[in-house]
Amino acid sequence: MPKFLTSINAISWYFLFPVIFIHFFVVAFPSILSLLLCLTDWNGFGRINYVGLENFQELFRDRVFKKAVKHNIIWTVMFLTIPVIVALIIAYLLTGIKRGQLFYRLVYFFPYILASIVNCLIWRYIFHPRHGLGGWFENQGIDFLAKSPFAMKETALYAVAWVDMWHFWGFLVIIYLTGMYQVDDSLYEAADIEGATKFQKFRYITLPMIRPIFVLSLIIIIIWSVPTFDYVYILTMGGPAYSSEVVANHLYSQAFQRMNVGYASTIGVMMFFYVGIIVGFFAILRRMGWEV
Amino acid sequence: MMNKILKIFLTFILTAFFATSTFAATKVVWWMESSADTDPTVQEMMCDAFNAEQDEVELECVFKEDINDTIRPALLSGSGPDMFDTPGASYIKIYQDAGLVKSMQEYADQYGWQDKLLGWAYNSGVFDGELYSIPKNYETMIYFYNKTLFEENGWSTPNTLEEVESLAAKIKAKGMNVYAYGSAGWQPTHEHLVGNYFNTYAGPENVYKALIGEKKWTDPEFVEAIELLRKHMVDEGYWSGDLETYYSLDWDDFNNEFATRGSAMLMIGTWGFNVTATNFGESSDDWDWNPLPILNSQAGSAPNYQLATGGTMSINASSKNADGAAKVIDWILSDKARALKVTGSLGYGAWLLPLKYTDADFDPNIDPRQKRFLTEFAEASDSGNYGYTTWTFYPNDPGVHIWKDMEVVWAGDITPLEFMEESQRLWDQARADDALVPVGKR
């Protein structure tokens, strides 16, 4: 048998082959197919007609798509700020707790291990106008949360994001905490000798030292925000009046409710390019010497 | 000796094998929409009963969640069951275009299905002159009311717009909501209301003309119907008090609200019979139902019943046992008393086959209110006094638009006219794409 077939490199490829094979047929091939479908008017069943760039022209006229893109941007900004800040603070405070830290870790991480449907039902019940907090306040004679924030177009997007953030931030706490534990204690000891405050230690030691893991968390948030779907679908289905519609939800509606599979593929391709741009941006930063 | 034993053994095995394959019943697999409440009854009273009555065809019923998502890849791959359910005729149209569903015309002619089914129900499955689907269930929109409450307050059931609005004011003055309803968990609930207003304000004749393209959806009667619905929903808060609460209540919530005097009426499909009877069974109040009031004189003088099919059954184009599947369908359609017994066991909310029932077919213990619906509906639809639901007669894209964008009208982001202009655009597109579903001639 030729030597190159039994080399370490070749053996690595043998082990990778099943995964690559599955990935090609389950992910890569459908993705390539989707690239082609976006140039058609396919309804998912019958004839496939080539329509050129018509779907793209339609996409830029589509008011719901524009709204959904705006909502995805708001969503991303919210996730890049609120859970990140809260998780950083809590993780840092947790590093100072010697006893009972595991309990807090469990409590904060618990929503993350719950299925999205469970999280959504909990919060739908809490905000229910009859049985939830609104009903309880009403019985006390207080007009607060009388209407579910999921049902008001002014608040629906933020309410859904709140539930998703409630589920997500515990995950950030755990990865930040892991990063913080990797910081050399001698740096803090030196800072203590110099009389640094807790905030100064956080600002000048912790934050710079966990930068790779912190930036990774931001990349994850940005990329995961693009296909966000489940919480929106379960809680509001993008309503009321598209006030919480996000791009993935619009894609689903076009593909499986309106049976415009070609058009839905166009939306998918736009999402793909958007993620590509983000990944490319961070790749450029890395090339420029950023610790990303 | 050993050879002899071996020969006898092999002869026995081969005989058993050929006997089994020669005389085995044809197996027909049917994928049905699953519902935890009804599956055991359907299995027992339809599938098991069919297998027990004959030995030519062995029927295997497989209950599937979200049947449309499940059946689609199966059909596209050229496999799948012999028979399958779909949510409605608009899906059949797509399958038929793609050659995934078998024409049942030869079976319909052979077994005389047209004579067994109500005319409109048979026509709803006819595409390009051939039968492709048969409704498993029919339904219409009505309203239930708390009879005891109405009697206590001396209220009369409304028949006109003026009477509806006058009654609504009296109900609200008592601190109750006019109608119980909500869309949490099922956003397409909105289309029930849109269909009600189209048929009782613009009228079935105008809806029919718009469906077949003789009229525009932007004509004043449709725009006014949407404006009236907007007024009743947003300004008056007829449904569960206000728009936001309507968006927040689910099936259990609003049914409970109706049964506990939170609301005086419940405008819903006839699938509500079962739950209404159950909920009121635990209350000292009594209930009854009426057809929807006519909100405008152009909608006619007599109440109309909107036609709707709740699910269809069809044969897979790639089925190798289509003849067996047709026998299953014929067995189902052939015995009206049995069909009524099955749907009666399910509270008449499922498997209400659109057959030509007569008085003799009914169980003497049937709830008279339920019987009144079945007979009045048959009479009204037979005499042409019927309307059209959006979920049976609309193609996909315009159908989704109705319930998705109605929220935009309620939010005040677009006007009723803009809503109907978009509707017309989508209908024009569907017509150009040959995506319309059949509408029988009035």
Image (tube, rainbow, N blue to C red):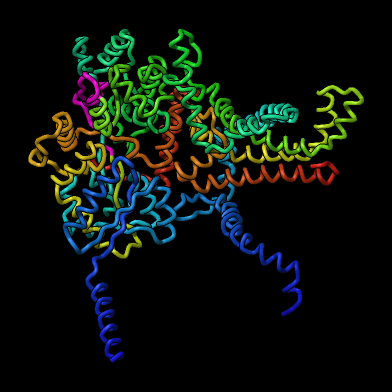
Q: Find residue B213 and report its horizontal and vertical position in percent.
A: 34, 38
User: In this orientation, which residue lies closer to the viewer: B220 or A265?
Assistant: A265
The image quarter containing residue B293 is: top left
Is residue B143 shown left or right of residue B391?
left
**Observer-nearest of B96 and A196:** A196
In the rendered structure, does residue B304 fall within the stretch colored magenta?
Answer: yes
Quadrant housing the C terminus of chain B: top left
Question: For residue A83, which quarter of the picture?
Answer: top right
Residue B392 image offset from top left, x and y in percent: 32, 40
Q: Residue at x 40, y 33 (%)?
A: B188
* The stretch drawn in magenta includes residue B215: no
Answer yes or no: is residue A241 visible.
no
Tell me the residue at 34%/46% (across/down). Answer: B33
Magenta residues (range)? B280-308
Q: Is residue A263 above or below residue A68?
A: below
The spot of residue A75 in percent (x, y) is: 62, 31
Is residue B240 something that shows in the picture? yes
Furthest toward the front, the residue is: A99
Does residue A282 sit above or below B418 in this rendering?
Answer: below
Image spot of residue B286 (x, y percent): 20, 21
Instruction: Indicate the quadrant where residue B386 lies.
Output: top left
